Amino acid sequence: MSEFFAQFAVPHPSTLIYIAMASIVLGSIALVAIVTYFKLWGYLWREWITTVDHKKIGIMYLITALVMLFRGGVDAVMMRLQLAVPDNGFLDAQHYNEVFTTHGVVMILFMAMPFITFFFNFLVPLQIGARDVAFPRLNNLAFWLFFMGMGLFNISFIVGGSPDAGWTSYFPLADNEFSTSVGTNYYMLALQIAGLGTLMTGINFITTIMKMRAPGMTLFKMPMFTWSALIANLIIVFAFPVLTVALAMGTMDRLWDTKFFAIGDGGMDMLWANLFWVWGHPEVYILILPAFGIFSEVISTFARRNLYGYTSMVWSMILISVFSFAVWTHHFFTMGQGAFTNSIFSITTMAIAIPTGVKIFNWLFTLYKGKIVVTTPMLYALHFIPLFTLGGVTGVMLAMSAADYQYHNTMFLVAHFHNVIIPGVVYAMLAGLTFYWPKMFGFMLNERLGKATVWVMSIGFVLSFIPMYITGLDGQARRMYTYSDAAGFSTLNMVSFVGAGIMSVSFLMLVWNIWYSFKNSPRDIGSDPWDARGLEWATHTPIPHYNFAITPDVTDATSEAFWDSKKNGVKLFKGEIKDIHMPNNSGQTFILSVFFFIGGFALVFSMFTLAIISLIGILACMGYRSLEDDHGYHIHKEEVELIEKKYEKEGGAK
Amino acid sequence: MKVNMKGTLLSFMGLGAILLAGCNDKLAVLDPKGPQAQRQADDTMLLIYLMSGIVLTVLAILVFMLVKYRASKQSPDYEPPHIHGHWLVETIMIGIPVIIVIFLSFVSVKSNYIVENVPQEYEDQEPLVIYASSSNWKWHFSYPEQGIETVNYLYIPAGRAIEFKLYSYGPITSFWIPQLGGQKYAMADMVTTLHLAADNPGEFWGRNANFSGRGTAENIFDVTALTQTEFDEWVTEVHETAAPLTEEKFDELLEPGHLGKQTYTGTHLEFSPAPEHNHESSDEEDEEDHSSH
Ligand code: HEM
Ligand SMILES: [Cu+2]
């Protein structure tokens, strides 16, 4: 019995972990108490957990992403604190390894991914004039699978131990022989479950965009964000199955001693590296393309001009998506594949910089002859351009394979990818968050605080990451928990720590801004507070659950339908209000996901009976669903008219 | 706010440039002591200049646009035009990056063949072969020609090409001596080759640069380049003073942990050969492998 419980204990406990455990337990109790006290269980179940409304699902992704941003952020500060001075004893090697592994996984998969998925969900149907996504219930399932994967990963550090083999989880290090806790089991299974959700999202949004565009919206009239979403989701559908297979093989290696990647008996560690990056490189483009889409919306809105070079923007994204599958070897130029192979991948990698460069110039020329207003979202975009360029050109440096022998595995690499991911993805997400906040919640975030946040964030960013380029060239390898004073890069590491501190302040400012604006911002802002351009702004605020009372017709409009309707008198809503067909909520998807969670947890600890029980549960749910008749319901014409009238009276009109 | 913004952006960039320029001659990678590292440092400097040019161009255009087309500078009734694109602008915008990438491709391919082969200056003599294998978290250096083995330190003759044969007794590691040249992976199931050379006698440091578990940070070694005569003297001395490396002793060394510097006569290659076969190895070879355990 005690043996059974012993396996759930954390193998390397520390005060920090005990504090975390205590605060998680207390936090959960408090949460349950509050929800019970205010009798919110029914509300949560009806309005959120079972919802098939793409906007609400989007907001659930958003909340998850923001929470994970803070969880990953705490890890980041701990790492910078550990490295701030030489020979620091704050974290030992094992903890440092667990922290950077968790940080990487959380930030890429459980922060950036849900953040972009929030935008897919919230924006895509609105931008294409649809009532919902193609498969609303699948959308709910995708969220809950993602959420369960996230949850499973996050309990690892209080139940059984965190993964410690890096977010890349290279074998044989990730094998049982060298990673002895169940941490890497969590990694394999949590990513698998969340990845299934992502794959569903991919299929769902490709279908939505291909099939549900408003009348008159040809592909080349789609708003830029929708384009970026389409391409990112295509990449998802091609890349994620590779991850699925790799994780399945990795899981088998760990649970059943197969030897796909292990040392001996023909196992190939290089196979893991290849599979991982065949998914991993496209993955970074899954993140950056939607970010580009958001910046395109923001920049054209606040330059008060149409996007320059729309067609070349689209084609460069298509090129990037194809090329992103042909460069993965640049993550291990140093694996000994020889000059010829490295040359090929060096050239394909640098080629990606060309369409990326085209996009940067397009944004710059969108400013040309514009009437630029610097709002908070725009300020993010304006900081993004030079900072991301810097990240891009250092990417080109890394792409020079022979020179990469000197940069690989150093802080130079760490500086590069943060230099693209933070100004690229994180800034885009925060710009988009600020931009669409009034559409979601009916009030604006404070502009003064918002702009100050951007500045503090950029100063923190520069102080935090620019020094890493230098220490990298001076020989500071990445993922090392300590260094000696003699190494000579302690000053720069201290600068970096200060920068990380400043960045954390900026994130706290963001939280403060949300709270402050919630308390103080005016609510009578109408439905188009930024004087924006896309169809998503042609809705009421808050958006009724059917989105558009009348399906918009954009035959006479450009890709900026709303702008055309405002400035050129193009009529978008022709025809009259009719009955609207809507999908029903469903709780089955949530229950199904809970079975996935239990099954995943059971497999982490090799509790096969429990795993089989949850498998039966999963199959039962699926069987039930396939026999069920569910035709959705209708909102009747009269009801829609009533709702629309109310909006007109209250001034939230379009 | 406006001036402030330009100023800050510029100072961000300036900060980077100054820091880089300031440390230029001290940074390990930019202080090469051998032909391969020299090539990599030259490429790096070329890239830094070229890439700074690109960043500054983008920044200059951005600042220009912001100064010229700010709403506050324009009449309230100004309506920005609808511009789709212009063939000339787009040709330039695509053309310049294409030219840069083509140029860099040539440089890159050339450098690849340089760093993957015996350094040109030292082609006239046979390279010295050293097997460098890692085990958690140590480096074992076998000199088959000299019949000696060291742990965690490396003596090499200056002015002669060294051919490192890399492999690992555990997780993937990466063999790296920044001042002599960039790194390469050491893996359990294959041997990779890295060509390095030191131009003059001197002392350097090397490390495992690839994360391989708890002891990675201390997975380091010292490198000393000697004259050929000194090197030969050292070899003789080792043969006179060091103990032979037995199989039991070697198995003991493989235990996870850290060790200081050690020296032996003989090499472990004799009883535990490097995995110098490819993956489609014949059954015969596999059997050999097993019988040797
Ligand atoms: C101009 C375009 C880019 C080029 C040429 C480029 C090039 C590279 C190269 C060659 C590496 C491998 C370096 C090494 O391991 O030694 C790398 C790593 C990386 N890049 Fe980029 N990159 C570009 C854009 C991006 C973007 C847009 C993102 C993210 C949104 C990104 C994220 C990453 C990440 C996460 C890694 C390293 C992951 C790891 O090893 O943990 N890169 N990049
Ligand atoms: Cu990549």
Image (tube, rainbow, N blue to C red):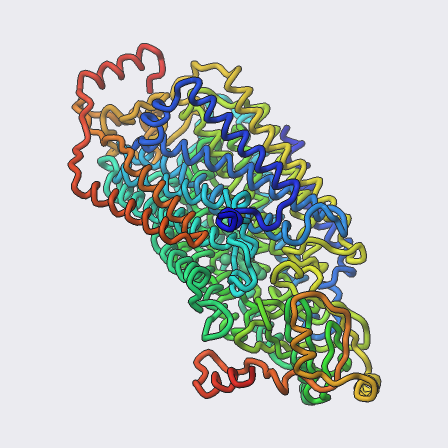
Q: Residue at x 37, y 26 (%)?
A: A44
- Residue B194 is left or right of residue B230, and the answer is left
Q: Measured along the vertical axis of the image, is residue A434 above or below residue A314?
A: above
Across and down, in percent, residue A561 comes to 32, 31
Q: Quadrant of residue B8?
A: top right
Tell me, yes or no, if residue B153 can be seen here. Answer: yes
- Image location of residue A212, percent across then percent down: 24, 39
The image quadrant where one finds the C terminus of chain A is top left
Tell me: A263 left or right of A537: right
**In the rendered picture of this protein, how many numbered marks are placed on residues?**
0
Q: Nearer the viewer, residue B278 or A552?
A: B278
Q: Is residue A279 above or below residue B255?
A: above
Say whether residue A492 is left or right of residue A77.
Answer: right
B225 in relation to A534, above or below: below
Front-lying residue, A322 or B110: A322
> Considering depth in this image, is A248 or A271 the residue closer to the camera?
A248
Relative image position of residue B99 (x, y in whole percent): 52, 61
Instruction: Give how far across and how far down residue A8 sits, in percent.
Output: 51, 47
Residue in the image at 29% along x and 27% along y: A547
In the picture as drawn, the residue positioned furthest to the front comes out as A1
Q: Residue furthest top?
A: A649
Q: Is residue A292 visible?
A: no
The quadrant where residue A510 appears: top right
